[in-house]
Every structure is written in structure tokens, then in C-alpha cells.
Amino acid sequence: MSEKARSAGLWSAREAFLRADYDTCAALLAARRGIERDYLLARCYIRMDRFADAERVLGASRGKDRSTWASLLAHSHFRRGDVAGARPLLDLADARATNDAERDEARFLRAFLEWIDLRREESATLLSTGTFGPFEGNAESLRGWLSIAKGDYAGALGQFENAIKLFGSDLFLECNALRTASNFAREMYMPAVMSRVLHRVSRIEWTPYLEVPRFHIMRSAAWFRAIDGEYGDAMRHFHELAALNVSDPWRLYTYCDRAYFSLVLGEEINGWATAEEALALANRIDWEAYSGGEIVVLLYVANLFALRRPIDAQRCWKLYSALSPTDPSIRAAMSAEPSVDAWEQYTAGLLEKGAGNPAAAAAHFNRAYSIYRRIGFEWRAVLTLLAQRDVAPDDGNYDEYIEAVLRRFPNSWLRRLADHERRRRGPVVVSSIA
């Protein structure tokens, strides 16, 4: 093969890699040889979570004496959970670096490894030591997760938006940052951020490897419509989301969303029928086959049934409590995020309420409310206060807070719930939201 043909083939493979078309990238590289081919194919397999294949390619490569080889092998090792095996490889990558790009990659991966190993202060220190060249977008995104661990979601949102600008044409990295930005824009009700996310999303050509971030971005947009009182649009989008090519646990969210909104809008028959479909799907799923944050949807199902069918709700809670993401990067993110703790506390409150333990329920609700107030998730804080009304004494300060928040959401289902509760001053059945 001529040098010209070889270069053209690598260029096409790189283009496929950047647009997250990893199957095409791997196919284009399969019959080729060379060190740069090996490195690109290893990066491709790492993005596909095919770590054994990445290590096989690197093990047969003629480029074992280079910094990039050691960095990629370290990356594969710690993504599959072998942090101890990755550390000496990153030392080797740093020692072999001959240019800034190689040093930047090794430095960023070391910061990422410390994050995965739950050594956040060490990760933050590494990220504060200058810029990271072509990996600055990755570094800024990781800074965002460190901000989240401190409860600074507003600061994190700015860092994720910066990362989106820095990723260039790498759609996988950009779409995952867009996913995170859309999620927290929804939680803190930031229309300008959501608008920027959706403007960028409208120009993306989707591939199978972008379906999960696409699902979450579109789901956040549907929730934004619901928060604004556009229930017809929201429900239509929830139905459309169920058709995306995502795993059953992610699809389960759409059943829960449709059930929840039917119930809060007073459509009891349709709402509980959809909730039963959600429970049936949850019972069919082999949860141990999933490695990421999908397991959190079990809390959603538990929320829906906590007051209606406590035994089923408790079973979902126990299953969630017994599982842990096997993907170390997702495990690190979930352990760092205060909102996950808040939602666990909220769910525990509903379960105690369903079991007839008002004091225990009130304690869990209060912890959830305190976290939501601290991190700026105001509409979730309101939902928590509404849920605890019949297990805790009335508090005028809570009433004032609810009214102040609802002024931001005049057309939201939150107003409907609050008005309903005010009229009857009795129990209000509300469920948390994913």
C-alpha cells in the first residue's frame, strides 16, 4: 500500500472516530498496519468499552517504546478497574514523553485516574497545574465533576459549557458534556443553558454510540417543557424517547415519566396502568448485566409505588442498594454527586411514610430538603416539602419558600400539587422524579 493511500485511510478513520462512528473506524483500520493505526484503533476500542481488544492491539504494536502506548494501556487498565496496574504505566508515559501533547495526555490521565480512585484532592491539584493542550476539554469536564462533588452545580455548569467549546469536533466527548449540562440546567431551571444545548444538538448527526447521551438530552428537554406547563409536548416527547435505541433500564425512565405526569395531572387510570407497565419491565430486567448509572431508575420505581404498594417499592429499594456500577468512572461520579444522596434520602422518606413511620420519614425528607436547598435544586426541594407535609409539623418558613419558588414556575405541575395540598391540608401523594 502506498504512503498516500495509507495516509488517506488513516484520515478517514480519524474522521469516523471524531464523529463517534466507531464501527466504521475499526473496520477502516482492521486491515492496516503501523504504530499510528494501532494507537487510533486502541482509542476506538476504549471508547467502545472493549478494553481487552484495546490491550490486544497495544500488546502486538511496534510502538511499545512510546509515551502514547503507555498512556493508552494505562487508560484501558483503569477504565476496567485496574487502578494499581495503571499507575506505573502513567509513570512510564510521563518519563517517555518527548512533546507537549504526550505530556498533556499523561498528566490528564493521571488526574482522571485519581478521580476514579476517589482521591479528589489529588485530582484537583493535578488539574490546577496549568493547561492540558488538546486534552483541555477533558480536563475542564473533570473540573466540572470536582465542582459537583463540592455541591457547586452552578460552577460545574459553566465548566461543562467551557468543555463543550474545547472538544472541537470530537462528538462523543461533546455529547456527554451536553448531556450533563442539560441535566443540571433542568434541575436548576436555567432556560438559557438549555437553549444553548438544544441549539448545538440540532446540528449533530447521531450514531449508535451517541444514543444514550441523545436520550438524556432529549429527556431533559421534555422535562423542561413539563416544568413550563407544556404537558402535551412533554408527554409526546416521553413517548418518542421510548423508541430510541437504548437499553431497557434507560427506557424504563420513560414509563416512569409518563406514569408520573399522568398521576399529577389527575389521570389516575392511565397513570397507574403505565406505572404497572414500568414495574413489570423493572421485574424483567437482569440488573446485574448493566454496569452504569442505569440502576438509579430503581429509585424512581420505588418512588411511584412507595405509598400504593410498599412491598414492591421496598423490593426495588433493596435491589438498588445491593447494586453498584461496575464502570469505575460512573461509580466515581455517582459517589461524588450530592443529588444522588438527596434522592436516596427522599426515596427512604417515602418508603418510611408508606410503612407508617412518620418520624423516620420526616428525618429522611429533611435531609433531602437540606441537600436540595444547598445545591440549588429548588423545584425538587419544593416536592420534598410537599411530600413531608403529613409527617412533619407545619412550618410557616416552608410555606414562604414554596411560594417564592413557585413564582418561578407559574404554569408548572408544582403549582397544581401545592394548590391541591393547600385546599385539603391533608396527605398529598407525590413521587420523586428522575
Image: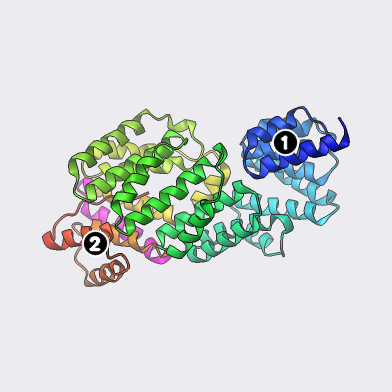
Query: Where is residue 364 drawn, in percent x and y?
Result: 31, 55
The answer to which of 181 and 191 lies nearer the viewer is 191
The residue at which mark 1 appears reads as 41
Query: Where is residue 372 drawn, in percent x and y?
Result: 38, 61
Q: Quadrant of residue 70?
A: top right
- In the rendered image, the quadrant that contains the N terminus is top right
- Disc tally is 2
Q: Is residue 367 magenta?
A: yes
Dot label at residue 340: none
Name the amino acid, label 2: Arg
Q: Quadrant of residue 230?
A: bottom left
Q: Secondary structure at mark 2?
A: helix
Name the amino acid, label 1: Leu
Q: How is the image coloured?
A: rainbow
Dot label at residue 415: 2
Dominant SS in magenta: helix
Query: Where is residue 114 drawn, in percent x and y?
Result: 64, 52
Q: Report the magenta residues as a range.
A: 354-375
Residue at left 46%, top 65%? 192
Residue 66 falls left or right of residue 252: right
The answer to which of 161 and 42 lies nearer the viewer is 161
Residue 396 falls left or right of residue 68: left
Q: Given contact means CB atoms under 8 Å apart, are the residues at marks 1 and 2 in contact? A: no
Residue 51 in sight in this render: no
Q: Secondary structure at mark 1?
A: helix
